[in-house]
Every structure is written in C-alpha cells, then in structure tokens.
C-alpha cells in the first residue's frame, strides 16, 4: 500500500491551469529561447568568419574556416553544454533548483556578450576568444536543461504537465526563428549601407570591413532575452517538491505554495519526516528501480541528437549541395549571410516551430511513448526516402521536393523525440535525483550532438577528394551520410521501448517515492 501523498504536492497535482503556470513557462522558456538562438546562430556566421579571417589571395573561392577551426567554433559550445548539464544537474539536487537557476542565466548573459568581443585581431586570437566564451556560454546553457525541466515538472499539475514541460522546450523553435530573422535584418541593413561586388568580380572588395560587425552583433544579441528574465528567475519560490521531499521543510513548502496557488495548505511536518532516503544514486536499489529507465532516456536522447544536430548545424551545406544557396563566389560576404539565414528561417517557420507546438498540443492526449515512437519512425522513413534516390533530389526540378522531405524529418523530430526526450527524464525519477538524472540524460544527448556535429562534418564530404572542402579528407558523400542517419533513427525507435509512459500520473507515483516509505515501514515492523 502506498503512503498518502503530502497535501502540498496533491494541491499542485490537481491545481487548475493558472496564471503562474504560464509565468513559469515564460521564465523557464526564455532560457531555452536563448539556448537555441546561441547554439544555432553560429551556423549562420561560420561562412562569414571564413571570408573575413581566412581569405587567400588569388583563390577561386572565398576563404573558409579550416576543418579544425570550423569543428571547434561549431562544437565547442556543445562540449560546454555537456559539462554544464552534468554539473548543474547535480548541483540542482544538492543546493536546490532556485539557488542554481540564476547562476546559469547570468553565465549565459555574460558569455553571449563576450563571444562577440575579441582579444586581438589575428585569426588565431579572434577564434580563440570566440571558442573560449562559447564553451562557457554552453556551460550555462547546459545548466538550463535539467533545471528548467525539473522546475516546470515540479510546478505543473498532473493533467497538463507534459504540455507545460514541452512548451518550455518549444521556445527553442522561436529561438532558432529569431536567430534567422535577426540575421536577415542585420544583413539587409548592412547590405543597404555598404554595397559590395560578388567575390568573382572583386575578391577583396566583396568582403567590406564593416562585415566584421555583422557576426558580432548577431552573437551578442543572444544576451537580451536571458537578461530580461533574470529578475523574474530570482523571485521564483523554490519548488515544493524540493523543499518538502529533499530539504525536508514542510512549513516552507506549504507557505510558498499557499501564496502561489492562493489556497490554504496544511504543513504536515510529520509526513515529511516519514519520507526517508531509502537508497542512494547508483546504488543497487536505484539500478533495480530506475536503471533501465535511465539507460532508456539517455540512449534515446543520444541517438536522436546525432541525427538532429548533424542536420541542424550543417543544413546550410545541404542547401548549397542542392543549389538552394548559390555558389559562394557569386555572392558578396553579407549577401551570403542573408541567403543562409533566409533558408534556415524558412525551414524553422515551416517545420521546426510547428513540430514543437504539435507536441505541446498532443503530448497529454497521445502520451510521451506514442509520440516518441511515431517521431523516430517517420524520421527513419523520410531519411531513407531522401537517401536512396539522392541523385534524383539533386536535379534542379526536384529541389523543392527535397526541401519538403527534409522539412518533414525536422517536423517529426520536434513532434517526436526531440521534445519527449526532454520531458520524460523530468517526470520518472525521485525528487532527490531528478535534476541529476535529467542532467545525465541530457549530457548523453549532447554527446550524440557532438558525434553528429563532428562526424557529419567529415562524413558528408564528397567521395572525390578534389570535390571535398579545402582541408578535408574525402568522405562518404551526403547520400551515404543520410543512410547512416536513417539507421541511427531506427535504433532510436527500438530503444524507446525502455522508456515508461508517465501521462496522467503524479511524479511520486512515477518515481516510486510513495512506496519508498511504505517498504521502509514494513521492514521495521
């Protein structure tokens, strides 16, 4: 027989959707808006950085970042994110969600601004500064994953918890969209003010000196949304589940939630004392109860992010390969930023953003398991549909078809595992490990992102060494790279069967915390 739930937790579980729910979504969601803006806007400016700092006199094509520099600039924030997810996930369980929450945001604001600055003007100095601050930006972003998910899951009611956590994550879609739109605005303004010929007409004049401001402005504006929500974050009360179940302060939990829910809640300190730490993280008991679930959430997130990040960070290369973005030599530097931003914004508008909000709308009706399974299934189908007849898609008449299929893989990533892998780890583990386990799952995802980002950079190069980008070895070609990604999505489908369904259940029911005490009591009789 399960122990009766604390009144304060029950009040949260059955609470009607109120204004504080939406406030929490916006406060937590703004972190994700910034996360997505910062992580993805770098892919808009890498070609510009190549033209500015790696120009070769007399070369037929504009300068590009050398492979090691490109990999560092694109991937260093991912390494920072992975470290931040593990560190702040652990810290969120040790010190409390709220105390750590402001730290991550302040780190993001400082490092967003600093990544647009440079110590020195040589290519090495500029790239080193950029990589240093983007690592620490990633570290702050990493902390936002376990903390935002945990805070939202612990504030939400049973009925709409999935939609609320997914809505926080869905702000990523708007962040990607904002990154593209802002880059379009900045590049349009600079194009109008500083006209320049195409590279093939005049190589030097095609990159105006003022273009150096374009990438800096785009990167630094990422600090704004985070800075605007900093005050609100510091004013949020600690979650009742942390205060009651981990900090063991029933009075404070009841008083905080009485104010939030605007109802009288009894403190019940005797019940809180009954909640005992039955087992530790990674103990035999933990592995027995939650080992398969943790492996399931970590492995599916790992597999998803290989496919998701390899597509996202390098979609500009795919657009170039199918002719959506003209050859670099036919454009000037700012025009190239404009064209890449336009293509990326179109994909975000048509597939990325709608996919996230479809999850929000359906997750508490269909359930997490069904959406994740469906998402992996369709990602596999569309990836293979792109890969097998790849030569067909590269013909000029079929390019729109390619973009539609490519958009559909994004749609089903977001109306699928990209959202559910974020939601589920915040629901199925005990309160005292919740933030840590979410951090482990998310860090596993970022490890997949690193494999996707770096692996795809090399894999997708042409099989013909002469056609590969400067400095890269011959790869397996885009077609074979897409086949590999299709296989990875298929594995994600299989591993989804390790993840439990949490729709409509309380967090304590999912994590087994209601049973912990009962078993302890029986043992002591």
Image: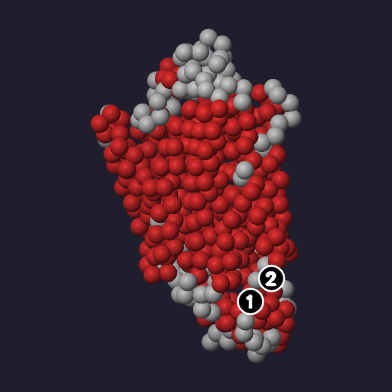
Residue lying at 38% horizontally and 52% vertically, measured from the top left: 412
Q: Position of residue 235 (x, y in %)?
A: 70, 66
Query: Taking 287 as reference, is 490 left or right?
Result: left
- The single residue placed furthest to the bottom in the displayed view is 525
Residue lying at 42% horizontally and 47% vertically, measured from the top left: 349
Query: Is there CB contact under 8 Å for labels 1 and 2?
Result: yes
Q: Position of residue 415 (x, y in %)?
A: 40, 56
- The single residue placed furthest to the front in the displayed view is 193
Which residue is under mark 2? 237
Tell me how many marks there are: 2
Q: Position of residue 214 (x, y in %)?
A: 59, 32
Element marked by disc 1: helix
Please state which of residues 4 and 393 is positioned toward the viewer in this rendering.
Answer: 393
**Is residue 277 visible to the viewer in this orientation of the structure?**
no
Residue 141 higher or lower than 326, as above or below: below
Query: Taking 270 as reference, is 428 left or right?
Result: left
Which residue is under mark 1? 260
Query: Taking 81 as reference, is 247 left or right?
Result: right
Residue 467 higher or lower than 192, as above or below: above
Element marked by disc 2: loop
**Is residue 374 visible to the viewer in this orientation of the structure?**
yes
Q: Quadrant of residue 39?
A: top right
């Amino acid at each position: 027989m399960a122990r009766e739930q604390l009144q304060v937790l029950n009040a949260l579980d059955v609470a009607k959707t109120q204004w504080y729910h939406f406030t929490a979504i916006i406060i937590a969601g703004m972190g994700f808006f910034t996360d997505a803006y910062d992580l993805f806007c770098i892919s808009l400016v890498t070609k510009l950085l190549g033209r500015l700092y790696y120009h070769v006199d007399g070369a037929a094509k504009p300068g590009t970042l050398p492979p090691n520099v490109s990999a560092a600039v694109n991937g260093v924030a991912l390494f920072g994110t992975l470290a931040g997810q593990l560190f702040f996930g652990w810290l969120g369980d040790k010190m409390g969600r709220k105390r750590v929450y402001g730290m991550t945001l302040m780190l993001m604001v400082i490092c967003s601004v600093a990544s647009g600055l440079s110590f020195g003007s040589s290519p090495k100095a500029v790239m080193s500064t950029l990589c240093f601050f983007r690592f620490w930006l990633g570290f702050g972003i990493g902390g936002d994953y376990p903390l935002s998910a945990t805070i939202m899951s612990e504030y939400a009611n049973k009925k709409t918890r999935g939609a609320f956590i997914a809505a926080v994550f869905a702000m990523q879609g708007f962040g990607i969209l904002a990154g593209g739109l802002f880059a379009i605005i900045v590049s349009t303004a600079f194009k109008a003010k500083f006209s320049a010929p195409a590279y093939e007409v005049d190589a030097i004049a095609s990159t105006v000196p003022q273009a150096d401001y374009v990438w800096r402005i785009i990167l630094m504006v990422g600090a704004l949304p985070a800075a605007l929500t900093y005050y609100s974050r510091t004013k949020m009360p600690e979650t009742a589940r942390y205060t009651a179940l981990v900090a063991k302060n029933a009075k404070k939990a009841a008083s905080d939630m009485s104010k939030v829910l605007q109802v009288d809640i009894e403190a019940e300190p005797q019940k809180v004392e009954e909640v005992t730490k039955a087992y530790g993280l990674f103990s035999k008991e933990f592995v027995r109860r939650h080992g398969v679930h943790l492996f399931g959430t970590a492995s599916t997130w790992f597999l998803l992010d290989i496919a998701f990040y390899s597509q996202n960070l390098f979609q500009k290369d795919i657009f170039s390969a199918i002719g959506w973005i003209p050859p670099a030599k036919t454009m000037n530097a700012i025009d190239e930023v404009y064209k890449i931003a336009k293509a990326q914004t179109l994909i975000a508008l048509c597939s990325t953003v709608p996919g996230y909000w479809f999850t929000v709308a359906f997750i508490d009706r269909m359930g997490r398991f069904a959406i994740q399974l469906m998402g992996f299934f369709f990602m596999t189908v569309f990836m293979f549909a792109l890969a097998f007849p790849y030569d067909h898609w590269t013909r000029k008449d079929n390019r729109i078809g390619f973009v539609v299929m490519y958009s559909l893989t994004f749609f089903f990533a977001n109306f699928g595992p990209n959202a559910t892998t974020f939601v589920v780890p915040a629901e199925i583990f005990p309160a005292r490990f919740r933030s840590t386990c979410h951090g482990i799952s998310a860090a596993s995802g970022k490890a997949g992102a690193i494999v996707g980002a770096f692996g795809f950079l090399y894999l997708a190069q042409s099989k013909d060494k002469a056609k590969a980008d400067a400095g890269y070895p011959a790869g397996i070609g885009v077609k074979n790279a897409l086949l590999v990604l299709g296989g990875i999505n298929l594995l994600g489908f299989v591993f989804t069967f390790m993840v439990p369904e949490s729709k409509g259940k309380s967090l304590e029911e999912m994590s087994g915390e209601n049973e912990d005490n009962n078993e302890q009591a029986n043992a002591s009789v």
